[in-house]
Image (cartoon, rainbow, N blue to C red):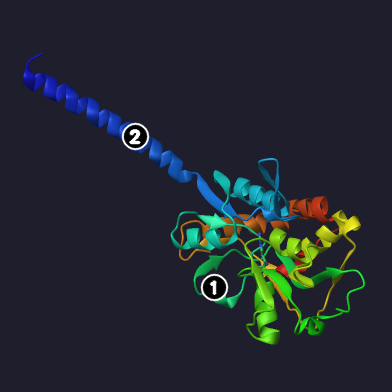
């Protein structure tokens, strides 16, 4: 081979390698990355290194229905929103409440779960309703609707103790750093039920906390909301959703509440 031929072969080889490389990035592109904060049982939590929960099962059913390949990544809560804005994840599922504030920055799927904030406190506590939280130290997960509800009632103030995860917010109650936790009812009821030795009580207050709906979250104007949304509708209408709901909550869902 003369020099010219060698260069030619070299270029062809390089082009083939480049094509192969591009081809493989292409197929990786199809695998969506979905972020979550796996510290919110029964919606998402770690079982060893596996993320499990109601949200995980709903997501899996939806992605199968949409015929989309994905991986679920435990990003944590605050980093999930940053990752969505930087489009480092294609979507998130994390018991995320659909609200107007978030809708300015993100898109959401149609609702897949109805929730409401509630209070977790120690047995024998004088706290009986949300109003009784006034002037008391209360923990929340940072940037959640629980924090928002407290700030709406009492204004931003230093009694509202914000933690990176709900697990840490509950820990603060157990340690006696705060007198109550405010978080989603599904999560606090689950914790109370699984930890009878901790002598905790949950308090619901439908006058002071509003009904909320969870949705899958997307970067604004991302690529996949339509197909995922369609698949979500099918999962709900086919009865697959009710099956998952019963597995995690032991009762039939009120599917009509999701359709308004
Ligand atoms: N539903 C509440 C919100 O959207 C709390 C969600 C917290 N989720 C979690 N995986 N830590 O603000």
Quarter of the figure that contains the C terminus: bottom right
- Residue 116 coordinates in the image, percent (x, y): 75, 72
Q: Residue 250 is drawn in which quadrant?
A: bottom right
- Residue 27 coordinates in the image, percent (x, y): 43, 39
Task: Report which residue position mark 2 lands on.
Answer: 21
Q: Residue 140 is drawn in which quadrant?
A: bottom right
Task: Report which residue position mark 1 lands on.
Answer: 103
Residue nearest the viewer, comparing 149 with 251: 149
* Residue farthest to the right, as pictured: 124
Instruction: Report, in whole angstroms, how far the alpha carbon at label 1 lies from the one at label 2.
Output: 37 Å
Ligand 1 image position (quadrant): bottom right
Residue nearest the viewer, comparing 66 with 10: 10
Q: Mark 2 falls on what kind of element?
A: helix
Q: Report if residue 67 is visible in the image.
A: no
Q: Report if residue 61 is visible in the image.
A: yes
Q: Residues within 10 Å of mark 2 (few under 14, many from 20)?
A: few
């Amino acid at each position: 081979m003369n020099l010219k031929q060698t260069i030619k072969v070299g270029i062809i080889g390089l082009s083939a390698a480049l094509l192969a490389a591009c081809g493989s990035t292409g197929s990786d592109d199809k695998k969506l990355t979905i972020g979550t904060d796996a510290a919110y049982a029964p919606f998402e939590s770690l079982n060893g290194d596996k993320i499990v929960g109601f949200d995980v099962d709903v997501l899996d059913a939806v992605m199968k229905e949409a015929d989309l390949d994905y991986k679920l990544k435990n990003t944590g809560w605050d980093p999930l929103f940053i990752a969505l804005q930087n489009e480092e994840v294609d979507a998130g599922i994390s018991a995320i409440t659909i609200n107007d504030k978030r809708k300015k920055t993100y898109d959401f799927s149609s609702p897949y779960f109805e929730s409401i904030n509630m209070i977790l406190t120690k047995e024998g506590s004088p706290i009986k309703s949300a109003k009784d939280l006034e002037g008391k130290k209360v923990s929340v997960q940072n940037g959640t609707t629980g924090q928002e509800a407290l700030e709406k009632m009492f204004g931003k103030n230093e009694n509202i103790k914000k933690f990176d995860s709900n697990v840490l917010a509950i820990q603060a109650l157990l340690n006696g750093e705060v007198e109550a936790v405010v978080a989603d009812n599904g999560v606090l009821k689950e914790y109370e039920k699984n930890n009878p030795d901790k002598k905790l009580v949950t308090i619901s207050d439908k006058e002071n906390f509003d009904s909320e709906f969870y949705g899958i979250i997307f970067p604004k104007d991302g690529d996949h909301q339509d197909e995922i949304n369609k698949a979500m509708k099918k999962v709900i209408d086919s009865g697959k959703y009710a099956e998952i709901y019963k597995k995690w909550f032991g009762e039939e869902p009120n599917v009509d509440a999701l359709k308004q």
